[in-house]
Amino acid sequence: MLAVRGLSKAYGAKRVLDGVDLDLAEGESLVVIGGSGTGKSVLLRCILGLETPDAGQVLWRGEPLAGQQAAFMDGFGMLFQNAALFDSLPVWRNVAFRLLRTMPKTQARRIAIDKLARVGLGPEVADLYPAELSGGMRKRAGLARAIAADPKVIFFDEPTTGLDPIRAAAINALIRGIVDETGATAITITHDMSSVRSIADRVALLDCGRLRWQGSVAGLDSAEDDYLRDFVAGRARPMARGPQA
Ligand SMILES: Nc1ncnc2c1ncn2[C@@H]1O[C@H](COP(=O)(O)OP(=O)(O)OP(=O)(O)O)[C@@H](O)[C@H]1O
C-alpha cells in the first residue's frame, strides 16, 4: 500500500537518510525505532511530503505519492508528538478541525464528541481549552483528532513522549485498539519499547541512515543484531552512532 524506495536526504554535509527501503501492507502497523537523531522524523516528513528527498520516492498504491498528495492527505490522520492542539480553540473544534470544512457544525461537533468518547474523554471535555487539560488528556484529544475523519492511514509521532508509564500504557492500548477496530494502516515512530510491543505488527530499526533490521515483534527478542539487542535492552553503547557525511 505504501512503499519507500531508495529514500535519501542530507542537510548540508550531513547525510540523514541513505537509501531507505520500506514496505507497508494495508492494515499493517509498522513501528520505526532508532536512536535520537537517526532520522525517524525526517523519514516521516519525507513520507508526508513535508520534505523533499534528495533521491528516492514514496509510492502510494503503486504510484508516486507526489502526484496524488491531496487524495493521500484526505485519507490520513496524524497524532503529533506534543499533540499540537490549537490553544485558541476548544477541544471539540480541535477534534473537528478537518470535519468543519466539509459538514455543518452540529454534525461535526457530534462526531467530535463520539471520537472523544472513543479515547476515554467525556462530553464535559468538549468545551474546555487545551490549556485546561493534563498531558495525558491532551494526547487523548490529539488522538481523537487523528481519527476524526476515519483515516485509512494514521501516523503516530512519539505517542507516549512526556507521559508517565501508566498513561503511556493507556495511550498504547488505545492506539492498538483503534488500529485493530478501524483496520487502518499505521506508522509509529518511537523510542519507547513499551509502545513497540503494544502497537507493532512489524518493527523497523533505523540506524546510520538505513533500515538496519526489520521483523516481527516476536523476532525482537531473538534477533542476532547487536545494536538492536542493546536498543531493546536499553544498554549503553561505547559511541554515538550516525551516518557518515
Ligand atoms: N531541517 C533540518 N535542517 C538541518 N538538519 C536537520 C533538519 N531536520 C533534521 N535535521 C537533522 O537530521 C537528523 C535526524 O533528525 P530527526 O529529527 O529525524 O531525528 P529523530 O530520529 O526523529 O530523533 P529523535 O528521536 O531525537 O526525535 C538530526 O541530526 C537533525 O539535526
Image: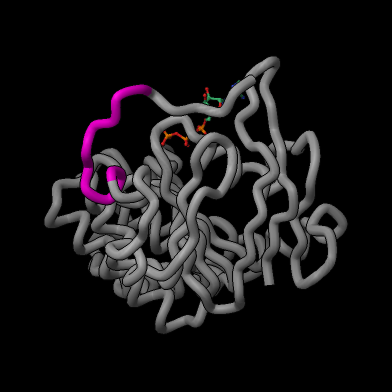
In the image, taking residue 84 as reference, residue 55 lies left or right, namely right
Q: Is residue 160 visible?
A: yes
Q: Position of residue 225 (x, y in %)?
A: 39, 51
Quadrant into which the C terminus falls: top right
**Which residue extends farthest front?**
224
Q: Is residue 116 visible?
A: no
Quadrant into which the N terminus falls: bottom right
The one nearer the camera, 151 or 103, is: 151
In the image, taking residue 227 as reference, residue 69 lies left or right, namely right
Q: Position of residue 121 (x, y in %)?
A: 25, 65
Q: Position of residue 130 (x, y in %)?
A: 32, 44
Q: How many marks?
A: 0
**Which residue extends farthest top?**
13
Q: Position of residue 96 (x, y in %)?
A: 50, 61
In the image, taking residue 59 as reference, residue 102 lies left or right, namely left
The one nearer the camera, 202 or 97, is: 202
The one nearer the camera, 79 or 148, is: 79
Identity of the residue drawn at 23% across and 32% down: 236
Does the stretch in magenta take in 65? no
Identity of the residue drawn at 14% across and 52% down: 165
Q: Is residue 113 above or below residue 139?
A: below
Color encoding of the figure:
one colour
Q: Is residue 122 above or below residue 242?
A: below
Magenta: predominant secondary structure element? loop
Identity of the residue drawn at 56% across and 28% down: 243
* Quadrant assignment, res 199: bottom left
* Chain part drawn in magenta: 230-239
* Quadrant assignment, res 55: top right
Does the stretch in magenta take in 237? yes
* Quadrant assignment, res 22: bottom right
